[in-house]
Image (spheres, coloured by chain):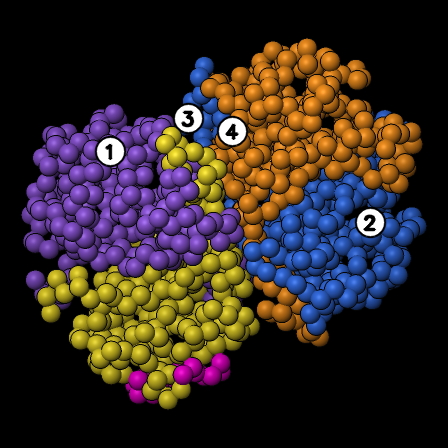
Chain colours: A blue, B orange, C yellow, D purple
Amino acid sequence: MDVHQLLTTPPYDLGHPYFTGMPHFPSHPPFLYSLTKKHGDILYNDGVSSAADAIALGTHVGTHIDALSHFSCNGVCFGGRVVQQTYEHGMAELGVDTVAPIVRRGVLLDVAGAEGVDVLAEDFEISPDHLAKASRTDIRAGDVVLLRTGWARYFADAKKYINNVTAPGVGLAGARWLSAQEVFAVGADTVAFERTPSSAMPVHKHLLVDSGIHIIEVLNLEELARDLVYEFLFVAAPMKIRGATGSPVRPLAFALTSPQR
Amino acid sequence: MDVHQLLTTPPYDLGHPYFTGMPHFPSHPPFLYSLTKKHGDILYNDGVSSAADAIALGTHVGTHIDALSHFSCNGVCFGGRVVQQTYEHGMAELGVDTVAPIVRRGVLLDVAGAEGVDVLAEDFEISPDHLAKASRTDIRAGDVVLLRTGWARYFADAKKYINNVTAPGVGLAGARWLSAQEVFAVGADTVAFERTPSSAMPVHKHLLVDSGIHIIEVLNLEELARDLVYEFLFVAAPMKIRGATGSPVRPLAFALTSPQR
Amino acid sequence: MDVHQLLTTPPYDLGHPYFTGMPHFPSHPPFLYSLTKKHGDILYNDGVSSAADAIALGTHVGTHIDALSHFSCNGVCFGGRVVQQTYEHGMAELGVDTVAPIVRRGVLLDVAGAEGVDVLAEDFEISPDHLAKASRTDIRAGDVVLLRTGWARYFADAKKYINNVTAPGVGLAGARWLSAQEVFAVGADTVAFERTPSSAMPVHKHLLVDSGIHIIEVLNLEELARDLVYEFLFVAAPMKIRGATGSPVRPLAFALTSPQR
Amino acid sequence: MDVHQLLTTPPYDLGHPYFTGMPHFPSHPPFLYSLTKKHGDILYNDGVSSAADAIALGTHVGTHIDALSHFSCNGVCFGGRVVQQTYEHGMAELGVDTVAPIVRRGVLLDVAGAEGVDVLAEDFEISPDHLAKASRTDIRAGDVVLLRTGWARYFADAKKYINNVTAPGVGLAGARWLSAQEVFAVGADTVAFERTPSSAMPVHKHLLVDSGIHIIEVLNLEELARDLVYEFLFVAAPMKIRGATGSPVRPLAFALTSPQR
């Protein structure tokens, strides 16, 4: 496939929109918005006017990526890095600004589809068997592997999407299955990737702290699944927020084979 | 060139980092940051802990794209759309959330390089002649055309970068030269794209309101210019902020020909 | 005591400062700060320059007051008002903007002092007996009653102050003792007023929903206690944030009798 | 007048409400608001639920006070203090957190009333003669002197209130008249206190930098004027934002003589 084909076939958009009232994990600050000025408030010459906006949000709100510095265990992050942190400047190491633009092979595991349901049940723990069953292509070292639970269709209803922090996801065994394949990042269409509630967040700990594998959350995987696109070019560029533990991101998926639309 | 080559050659990163104290146009809210919790503040079981962050910023702060709704003339935006706006929800039409992922041919016009300087003078108005002189490849309808003034190297010094809102850029004649080629978007490495100060912002008006051409600002074009990459695959995915007039974005440039590094 | 004496004796300042990294209850957005411009960034004529700032915070961060709309039970707030709410505009009724300036008789119950300790233990539940024992003056209908646990001295250490949401405070019996006296508001020097952790927040429910009694939290009561000021004029003016469930406030206490400093 | 009378007569509320879309000086970040959680999103036991909010704003938005560090001249603030500033921590000296609670004699000069108009014209410069003419009581050292232009009645219409930064106010001569009386603070019901537009902000410079006199802006003085209350007890407690150049404040005025309502 020639690279120029990328110019003629629109990619899949794996990001959700941002708006006041959008879902957010309870411990993360919500998304705030306002115009800063309206058209007409201030006029340049010749009838010209501009409007602009301000926003505020937690870095783990909406479609976002976790930097490796997001989790620690006994004061140590991935690679044995001892936590160094300040409120003003965040993390001295492994900030999301150190994540290079992500241009990698992507793989979709449509777990909901493989189970024959639109959406996995809120207490569904995705096991290695479920992952194997949902695999339609091989997984290679360095890939980005995305797991579909179907939860994205609840996104427009914040209460239903957050669901009192109860949602399907992989358990520790599933996380180990993923890390064993030496992927670069994993993702899902839920807010927490791993099955929640969880008292120890073992999947985050295993992936971010032990394995150095990024986690992407709140993805929209509905269109990929609808079109049976299981292998794709995955491109994502997080905001380079210095020292931050996460960042909004709007990943794109370019089908590497002709989709059956 | 095969698409799989994209997986092995890192793209150029055209975005600047975000940090407290970073440059911002005076009328736009600055970037704010804090950890929301430190590692160790709250412990999950087994010694596991997480940190997270909050940010606030204007939507035209840092590397960003202007939606077509950013400017109006006599109450009308591009395509004759009469402005409909509220502080809470922004623009009813032409919001930045309606900008599809941008995957287009990109072209660099290194104006500073063509003029034989590191950085254009603060009062340098880029004319059609300067643009023609800096063209190393053809420009095609639908392209994204980026103009380098060299200003990016001031980014680390907010006062110097903003420079009391005085910076080089195209004037109206240059903007018309660009719009005549029916490009999709234009960009520059300054905060305002057009030469400022300006009492009527004619370039913004001509591009956004009359021509429907997006503007990308605060780009980092130093590496592209260093490597003489004048033609590339340009990929950018703005945050889909509903109704907003702009959005942070971290564009990527994939060299379509082998760069001479 | 003549009102003009108020002009010559400084009141007690019951508010804590705001700064990046200050304590905040985990589910509330933290305090963010940045200068928006530095002195010297933009010069007016004659060498004159100005600096300004931006902040972001949860409305229940720092010394603050809870509006009656902060809590509900089965969808109903105080006075049988059915919850009407939107993310953009908050609460249709009982917003903090409806709280008139508070100018009332204030009473300090120094529970820690009465128990002979500097700071109550983290699992100390304040009972009616403790409240009675700490009473040095009568409580009258309409008063503002402030309970001192000594916790304010931990404020400079955010982790210690929040303490994984474990802190002393009244239990339901203590709350009923307070509401029986028909006070206007109660307050404490902890982040949650009531003893936490709590699975049902019965004190908040009893005071805000059943009794229409406001709650003021994160107070600094150390100086009042040091000076043995148990009765005072209490003055507080919350920010009138339309529809909000809470607001920062910096309450003042004017000793009504000569303090024994 | 006995201090206990303060408990029975409500004070005048000199603050305006905060809401998305409220007026703000163009160079200051606007007010943003959202609920962080709705009632019912998360349930405690027994049907109990809570809602909370987040806000973001410039420190000079809405009714607010200018710290002495807000202005400088040639790099020096009041009292010869050389500016020391960082984006993260603001001003090393003269931050708004160093302003003690303000409990002072207040004086209203109803300039609009004295001129026989509801609202002063947008180009009206208040001179010493106008100030003298509007004086109904003496001004004493340490007082807070508030000037009424009538502009507060435009507050609900943000565009009209800001008026492209054109509004009545004192000029330098008027500012000198005020500083000669050694007042503690001055205030007005406009966004900039001094007549604007101004290329050098001489009134801010004279009051804040030369004289050490605070400025309070965006006051609501309509009720004081309606009731002919020219002398009062003025009480205001700014948020103690560490290092900030300004702060929201909701001042109260207690009539010292019986008002003629």
Neighbours of disc 4 within 10 Å: few (<14), some (14-19), many (20+): many
Do callouts 1 and 2 point to residues on the same chain?
no
The residue tagged with tag 2: helix, strand or loop?
Answer: strand
Residue B173's place in the image compared with A80, above or below, is: above
The Cα–Cα distance between marks 2 and 3, rounded to whole angstroms, is: 47 Å
Between discs 2 and 3, the one toward the N terminus: 3
Q: Amino acid at mark 4?
A: Val
Q: Residue at x 43, y 74 (%)?
A: C153
Q: What SS does tag 4 mark?
A: helix
Disc 2 + disc 3, Cβ < 8 Å:
no
Highlighted range, magenta: C118-134
> Is label 2 on the same chain as label 4?
no
Instruction: Answer left or right for A113 relative to A84.
Output: right
Labelled disc at residue A144: 2
Please indicate, yes or no, whether residue D245 appears anywhere in the rendered image.
no
Q: Foreground mark, 2 or 3?
A: 3
Are the residues under marks 4 and 1 on the same chain? Answer: no
Q: Is residue A36 left or right of residue A216?
A: left
Q: Nearer the viewer, mark 1 or mark 2?
A: 1
For disc 2, the chain is: A
| Residue beneath the point at 37% across and 89% down | C116
Q: Is any part of residue D100 visible from this angle? A: yes
